[in-house]
Image (spheres, grey):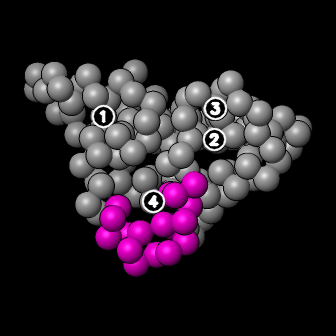
Amino acid sequence: MNRTDLKKLTRMRLKEAKALYKQRHYSGAYYLAGYAVECALKACIAKETRRYDFPDKGKVQKSYTHELKTLLGITGLDGTFDLAIRSNSKLDLNWTFVRNWSEESRYEFRSQADAHAIIEAISNSTNGVLPWIMQHW
């Protein structure tokens, strides 16, 4: 899996989440929307991997997580993101909602409101988490 694959997966997972939402499969839509953000953050991590360099073992091991806050930290963009959310309260609110996503949501029932909220928080063209991440991948 490389950065290009992760970018494609990001777009695919968001598209699938939106399709599930339209079909009223709200739990699945919520779950896949979160995976779109995970893939985008992992694309940012992959961007920092230089060809022929031997990767740092700790960074590699930490990257094998689904926790979005941890992945943001590994990207090295957390400081830049902190500045962005301090100057954009809507992005901050969206991140507050998105960062609570977990791979464990696959075992949860989610409402239409939950699915709509995470998809909007992720994909809003002005204040969405995903457009911000995509500026850095």
Closer to the camera, 103 or 38? 103
Marks 3 and 4, Cα distance to the nearest angstrom? 24 Å
**Residue holding disc 2:** 33
Dot 1 or dot 4: first in sequence order is 1
Q: Is residue 85 left or right of residue 17?
A: left
Disc 4 on helix, strand or loop? helix
Regarding residue 81, the answer to whether it shows in the image is yes
The residue mark sitting in front, 1 or 2, is 2
- The label shown at residue 105 is 3
**Residue holding disc 4:** 132
Q: Position of residue 105 (x, y in %)?
A: 63, 32
Dot 4 or dot 2: first in sequence order is 2
Q: Which residues are magenta?
A: 81-97
Farthest residue to the right: give it.
23
Q: Mark 2 and mark 4 in contact (Cβ < 8 Å)? A: no
Closer to the camera, 71 or 123? 71
Q: Residue at x 47, y 37 (%)?
A: 38
Principal secondary structure, stretch drawn in magenta:
helix
